[in-house]
Amino acid sequence: MADEKRARVLDLVGPFAGLIAVAALFAVLEPATFLSVYNLQTIAAQTVIVGLGAIGMTFVIVSGGIDLSVGSAIALSSVVTALALREGWNPAIAALAGAAAGLAIGIANGIVIARAKVVPFIVTLGTMGVARGVAKYLAGEQKIDAPPGWLAEVMARTPEPVWLLVAPGVWMLAILAVAMGIVLTRTVFGLHTYAIGSSEATAHLSGVRVARTKTFIYAVSGLFAGLAGVVQYARLTVGDPTTAVGKELDVIAAVVIGGASLSGGVGGITGSLVGAFLMTVLANGCTLTGVPNYVQEILIGLIIVVAVAVDRLRHRQA
């Protein structure tokens, strides 16, 4: 048990050290700009969408699965939210409708994966196309302009009231991260998630309802992708069926950089959020220092490869 706790601490120290090192580098290179209050508020706000997706993806990856439909679910959710607002719905109800769209995709993924025993990669690859296609159909293959109401304030980089310090969406992310961290580590559902990722056969023999748990896991991922879609709409104030292309890769990268194992059984919400912040800080710092976008992509790719290589090395040693 002591070795397990020590391993978890070490898994978290690595991503934290990486985040601090990257932030320190850009603080030295561009101290006035990078360390400004506005830029720090911007970094926090820019992390929300990937952070929300990473919370849901953590459950999936810890269980030994993968979800490639997150980006498309975000797009579908943003379109549904915009359509609801255009029809005059209350912003809160419109946001619930957007989140429900993501939840529906997640439930569909979970049912097919758990009941039909189809490989998660194939199922979510398929629903990635389905969700994107439905989003384009609902939007008529164009952006949907709709009055955001108070939803626009969710991602305001200079929040009102000012004592909030950061956008309300950032506080929402923090609260949900704490809540889902407790769910993952302190509830039967969370423990079963780890058990399935460690060994699905053993979990089944131990009495875990694997099929039902998997369905819930993918439902969680879909719900958080839906919430990310609502936030995406709040940020852009348009429902865009072409948005968030490739966002699922950013989300997966954040979880992997945060110490989760693609083999399952290892990972945590805190590490995933650290991974999300690390990616945002890296992109923000590169932009401020004039580093070309392709260099940012190369750096993030290398970080992902190193994170996975370290994970494989750790498994061999174990």
Image: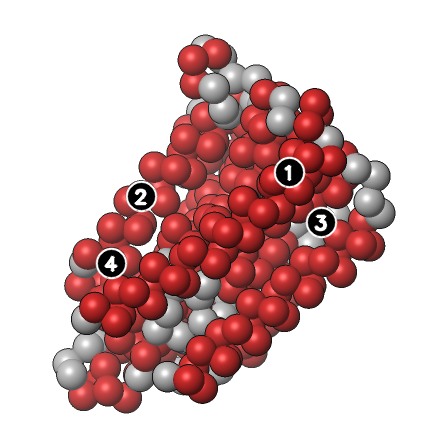
Does any portion of residue 151 appear in the rendered image? no
Report the amino acid beneath label 3: Thr
Direction from residue 55 to residue 19 in the image, left or right: right
Please tell me which residue lies in front, 65 or 308: 308
Report the amino acid beneath label 1: Gly
Distance from disc 1 to disc 4, alpha carbons, whole Å, reads 35 Å
- Labels 1, 4: front one: 4
- Quick check: marks 2 and 4 in contact, CB under 8 Å? no
* In this view, 175 is above or below 215: above
Report the amino acid beneath label 2: Val
- Residue 27 picture quarter: top right
* In this view, 95 is above or below 313: above
Residue 180 % position (x, y): 31, 50
Report the amino acid beneath label 4: Thr
- Residue 40 picture quarter: top right
Residue bearing mark 4 = 185
Mark found first going from the N terminus, 1 or 2 = 2
Please tell me which residue lies in front, 187 or 227: 187
Residue bearing mark 1 = 239
- Labels 4, 3: front one: 4
Residue 152 % position (x, y): 56, 23
- Judging from the image, what secondary structure is the residue with disc 2 in? helix
Distance from disc 2 to disc 4, alpha carbons, whole Å, reads 11 Å
Residue bearing mark 3 = 242
Quadrant for the C terminus in the image: bottom left
- Judging from the image, what secondary structure is the residue with disc 1 in? strand
Quadrant for the N terminus in the image: bottom left
Assess disc 2: are there few (<14), some (14-19) or many (≥20) residues with their C-alpha within 10 Å of its C-alpha.
few
Residue bearing mark 2 = 178
